[in-house]
Image: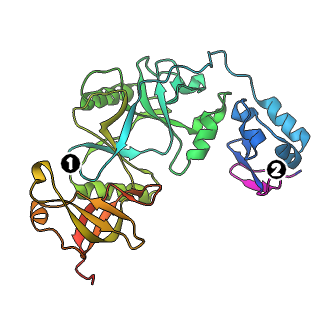
């Protein structure tokens, strides 16, 4: 019978119009059919008629027999941990001197002193040899394998058998939630602690201070060029808090685009009496406001209606509107 090597996938025709996809990721065989997806078993212990037909009944029976029962630890869903969540950078907040680190493409994990928990409170069944030596204080971090390896990471850490594939995973720590000191002191404590512990699978995520917007963009491009996802920014002196906070910002790829100015929108507050934002239009007719990136002089004498401008944004909404647009320049070469 055929089989799938680690990382391979194939299509099989089922009862649906479109074929189902069989995949082997880290020894976890999956199928996109509803029967496989809707099972309540751990992912490494699931099967379906398509996997049995493709691999053979005996091969599937042997694979399932090799999976062990869940460990003795209480595997019920715990209370969701009090995790700090990021907001997206709006291209306007001054982030000079903020702490900058790579946004890891892994699985967020909260070490409560005894076990790893997901954001929702699900237990990750890490082997004892992986967690050996971890302190009993809460730690916030990421279970991470490598860049562009998110799916493989998920397939390993969601298993219930504490398998040997955890040897490929690293726990990258970026905060100590229980400490009441400012962020810098918490990071210093973590670096001192883990430099002494020298744990094989655990380390503190490196941090550096953002020197300028150019530095931020250069670091972002460096990470993206290497296959990374983006950057995280942490406000100096900030405390750890539960829930979404503007003291933690995520930064993803910048995109530049052009639009035509169709209206000057009046300012408010410190911009009262001058331009607050430009209402602009994309070639496809989408309209939105650009309200950041301007100097005081540009607000006093804004680009005329009909002018083509270049703006920078991070991503598009579901309706195709640029998120966090920021003015860059007037297009001098535009008609």
Q: Nearer the viewer, residue 145 or 283?
A: 283
Segment tinted magenta in the rendering = 2-18
Left-right relation of 128 to 271: right
Residue 164 lies in the magenta stretch: no
Q: Dot 2 lies on which element?
A: loop
Q: Nearer the viewer, residue 173 or 128?
A: 173
Q: Residue at x 40, y 59 (%)?
A: 321
Q: Residues within 10 Å of mark 2 (few under 14, many from 20)?
A: some
- State which mark lies toward you, 1 or 2: 1
Report the magenta stretch's main SS: loop
Q: Which residue is mark 1?
A: 94
Residue 12 lies in the magenta stretch: yes
Q: Which residue is mark 2?
A: 3
Q: Residues within 10 Å of mark 1 (few under 14, many from 20)?
A: few
Q: Residue at x 80, y 38 (%)?
A: 47
Quarter of the rendering occupied by the C terminus: bottom left
Left-right relation of 262 to 24: left
Q: Of marks 1 and 2, which one's residue comes earlier in the chain?
A: 2
Quarter of the image for residue 242 reads top left
Q: How many marks?
A: 2
Left-right relation of 136 to 271: right
Left-right relation of 133 to 215: right
Q: Is residue 210 above or below residue 197?
A: below
Q: Dot 1 lies on which element?
A: loop
């Amino acid at each position: 019978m055929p089989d799938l090597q680690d990382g391979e996938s194939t299509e099989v025709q089922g009862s649906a119009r479109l074929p189902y996809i069989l995949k082997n990721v880290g020894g976890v065989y999956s199928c996109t059919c509803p029967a496989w997806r809707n099972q309540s078993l751990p992912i490494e212990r699931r099967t379906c008629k398509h996997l049995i037909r493709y691999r053979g009944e005996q091969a599937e029976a042997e694979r399932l027999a090799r999976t062990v029962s869940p460990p003795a630890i209480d595997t019920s869903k715990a209370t969701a941990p009090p995790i700090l969540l990021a907001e997206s950078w709006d291209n306007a907040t001054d982030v000079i001197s903020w702490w900058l680190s790579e946004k890891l493409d892994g699985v967020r994990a909260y070490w409560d002193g005894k076990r790893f928990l997901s954001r929702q409170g699900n237990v990750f069944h890490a082997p004892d040899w992986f967690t050996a030596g971890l302190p009993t204080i809460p730690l916030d971090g990421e279970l991470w394998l490598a860049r562009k390896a998110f799916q493989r990471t998920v397939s390993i850490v969601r298993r219930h058998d504490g398998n040997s594939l955890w040897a490929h995973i690293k726990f990258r720590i970026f905060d100590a939630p229980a400490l009441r000191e400012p962020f810098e002191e918490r990071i210093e404590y973590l670096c001192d602690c883990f430099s002494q512990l020298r744990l094989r699978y655990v380390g503190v995520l490196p941090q550096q201070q953002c020197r300028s917007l150019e530095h931020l963009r250069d670091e972002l491009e460096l990470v993206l060029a290497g296959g990374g996802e983006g950057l995280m920014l942490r406000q100096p002196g900030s405390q750890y808090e539960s829930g979404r906070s503007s003291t933690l910002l995520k930064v993803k790829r910048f995109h530049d685009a052009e639009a035509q100015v169709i209206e000057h929108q009046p300012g408010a507050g410190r911009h009262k009496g001058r331009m607050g934002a430009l209402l602009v239009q994309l070639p496809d007719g989408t309209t939105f406001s650009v309200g950041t990136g301007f100097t005081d002089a540009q607000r006093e004498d804004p680009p005329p209606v009909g002018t083509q401008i270049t703006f920078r944004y991070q991503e598009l909404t579901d309706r195709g509107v640029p998120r966090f647009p920021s003015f860059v320049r007037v297009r001098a070469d535009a008609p």
